Image (tube, coloured by chain):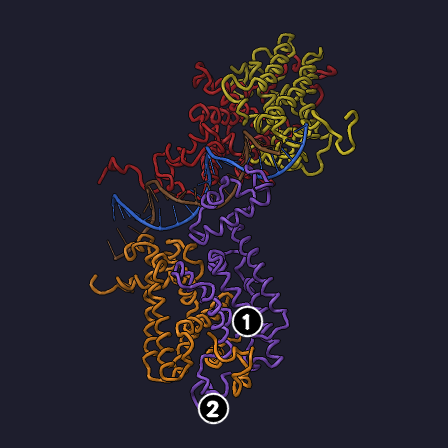
Chain colours: A yellow, B red, C orange, D purple, E brown, F blue
DNA sequence: CATGAATGAGTGTTCATTCAT
DNA sequence: AATGAATGAACACTCATTCAT
């Protein structure tokens, strides 16, 4: 069979991909536990048992999705992190990547966000390595910026990284739940959203007037220092 | 029978409570789907069938936990929101409540954070009302502070609320996963954590020097305005 | 509390009766297997566990109904059987009793007809004695009539009894299934029904002309004799 | 066994049949409610779960039996009904079919007669269509015979059909209960039984002498006409 | 008598996984 | 590589029955 026959346009590894794609759609719709192998097979339009040719079990399908898709995302973030731009630009890029990813592939985001925690393989001591890699990248970005004097150095970069990721994660989650953000949220909306999040992260919500000349007031705005 | 007899220390509704308590522990340990009714019964030291005397099904046990425990939490937040203190104090209190709740009852937090999405009752359009009530409370706190000039008014309070909640949520989540924060995180640590989060939220991560006299630099720190 | 208090109009054995009455209604509605003890208790407006004061178990409730109600019916039939009237009159009376019983208490009939077979106690070798007593009575009526020359003597009385009972049983069954015979079937209808059944049983469906002078035709109308 | 390998004598749909056959046997023995899926699987010598490969649930097994076997029976009756023979011959054939069916497959009869009522599908308004089809066929046979003058035209054919069916049904039922008619009832017995029932149905139980010249007596034998 | 909480065995159904073809 | 029939362990839920009060 040299050329692909018309009736069999996809061969080998292609099938694997179509299974993963189908699985993402079904997982996003029904969740990991709510999904049956037969659902995936039907969605991928392949035979029931064939799934087991490509994957050891249901768990491995989820793992593959998380690993492979997440890896793509991490690669993007890594490129941004290594870019010699100002920290603000980096954070803006990362926020934009995450939010636009959600906009374009809400199912992927849903699975990544909701199921990554469930997977046996990703649980356990030492945190799921994969996820922690994102934290590490963001932490590094922040630490380097602190070293360059671009960011306040007295704050724990790891905590700040968690806060930054958490902000974006929760914004996406909120949208996932609203079941299809009704019209009105176009690409521009998400860019604006990204700018707002980064603005908030860098400048804070506190009124600027307070800051200008006054670090000595007793109570408000956490005056002299957090810790 | 003045004091409760040893053989029958608990009566009626007490059993219901002990089932809920046991369920929280088991759900936290194994997750909703991984938990068998028999696990709950054993943990609560009651007969299998009695669970069904108090709850229609497994789902209803989870719902009851979410509803009842969450309600307690919301009540606390509401009191804080209505307090006539400075917004900074309010946010600090809320952060402290959440973080110390996690410290004292990590299982509760785990179940609340992880299982709230699973519940049928909490799914569906309009977001789970219960959860959105927290968002509403925080949003209100921020808006009132904006009106009083305590916070930057040009930022969307709803998004800011999401960011604030998301920060705390993710910090807790991170800890839940680390399966028992290795020693070193005592009560004081959590207080410090709360202060850091609120500091970050109010003052931002950006270096103060930047702000003081310089809103005119082109790129950095989102100078002239984010939105 | 010497005399019955107004709030407790029924005492002792009365409760037993109300349980049986309730049970008949529920059995008729849901069938024996589909009925829970709690259904009966609720219908009888008594406490759950009280049912077990009066009856050993669910089975015994059904048995009591069958035994007691059926006994009443049998007594009626026995009186008719012992009456020194013409067989036709006897059969007419019995048909009328059965059909009017159904008309007035369709639930009773339903339970008697449908559940009497299910009961463990009524199954097994030797047929359920109780039911066979009805067969015996009818058989006796027919045999006595045969002896008196009122009925064809060459036919097996036992089979004829089965046919007679089966006719009535099936007519009632058909009505039970039609779920509430739509208007139009009043008392008169049932009297007419009884007459038709007895007419059919005694005179047969065959055209009278055939019979009058012709027992010699080869095929039709089973010529000279059945056996 | 020349064809079909010994290790795999049955394929695909054959298994379905063997499940139905096994189910009939077990239902007949223990009744629908008393039968466990595992009983059926064991009797059919297949794996537990395979039952659910072919049937949605227990109910559907019963439905399939009733539908498929009953259909076969109805087809037979329909052929008889369409035959251009004398009504007596038709009724004799039908009676013979029913009684010999019982003789050869008492389990089938038992299930058909006793469980047809239980089935969800056969309940509800308008009577179970399937059963009513038998009534319709018999009614048609009688009406056509009435039109041809072979039967008394003044009697309601529908009621007569019910009586005819009920007679046979009850005779079979009686035998089912006696748990294996003790020896003595051979094929010939059932032929005789069929003849007796039809004789009774056509000629009635009333003494011929009565009829011959006397339709004018007041009471007995419903003289001039019942209705 | 009366109550209803407590018990736990029983079973229908699901579905991941294996395997013969 | 592909198919889908076959397998059976696992589990939620029901409900008759008991029992302490």
Q: Label 2, secondary structure: give it.
A: loop
Residue C75, how many percent across, how many down? 32, 73
Residue A70 seen by the camera: yes
Q: Is residue C213 above or below residue A131?
A: below
Q: Mark 1, chain letter?
A: D
Q: Is residue B130 above or below residue B208?
A: below
Check the image and name the residue furthest to the top.
A147
Whether pointer 2 and pointer 1 mark residues with C-beta atoms closer than 8 Å, the reply is no
Badges 2 and 1, same chain: yes
Q: Is residue B86 above or below residue C123?
A: above
Residue D178, how many percent across, how many down? 39, 61
Tell whether B3 sits left or right of D187. Answer: left
Q: Residues within 10 Å of mark 2 (few under 14, many from 20)?
A: some
Residue under numbered circle 1: D91
What is the count of numbered marks? 2
Camera-nearest residue between D116 and B205:
D116
Camera-nearest residue between A198 and F2:
F2
Camera-nearest residue between A101 and A22:
A22
Q: Residues within 10 Å of mark 1 (few under 14, many from 20)?
A: many
Residue B188, how many percent across, how many down? 44, 17
Residue B213 seen by the camera: no
Residue visible at 62% across and 80% down? D148
Q: Which mark is residue D214?
A: 2
- Quadrant of the drawing holding the N terminus of chain C: bottom left
């Amino acid at each position: 069979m040299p050329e692909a026959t018309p009736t069999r346009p996809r061969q080998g590894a292609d099938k694997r991909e179509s299974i993963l794609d189908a699985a993402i759609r079904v997982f996003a719709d029904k969740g990991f536990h709510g999904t049956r192998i037969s659902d995936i097979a039907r969605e991928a339009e392949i035979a029931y048992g064939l799934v087991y040719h490509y994957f050891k079990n249901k768990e491995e399908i989820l793992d593959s999705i998380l690993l492979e898709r997440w890896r793509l995302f991490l690669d993007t973030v890594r490129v941004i992190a290594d870019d010699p731009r100002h920290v603000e630009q980096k954070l803006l890029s990362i926020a934009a990547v995450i939010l636009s990813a959600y906009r374009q592939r809400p199912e992927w985001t849903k699975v990544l966000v909701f199921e990554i925690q469930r997977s046996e393989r990703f649980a356990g001591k030492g945190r799921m390595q994969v996820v922690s890699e994102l934290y590490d990248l963001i932490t590094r970005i922040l630490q380097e910026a602190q070293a360059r004097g671009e960011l306040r150095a007295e704050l724990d970069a790891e905590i700040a990284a968690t806060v930054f990721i958490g902000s974006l994660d929760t914004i996406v989650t909120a949208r996932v739940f609203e079941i299809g953000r009704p019209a009105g949220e176009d690409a521009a909306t998400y860019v604006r959203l990204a700018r707002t999040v980064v603005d908030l992260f860098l400048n804070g919500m506190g009124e600027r007037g307070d800051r200008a000349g006054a670090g000595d007031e007793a109570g408000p705005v956490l005056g002299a220092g957090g810790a």
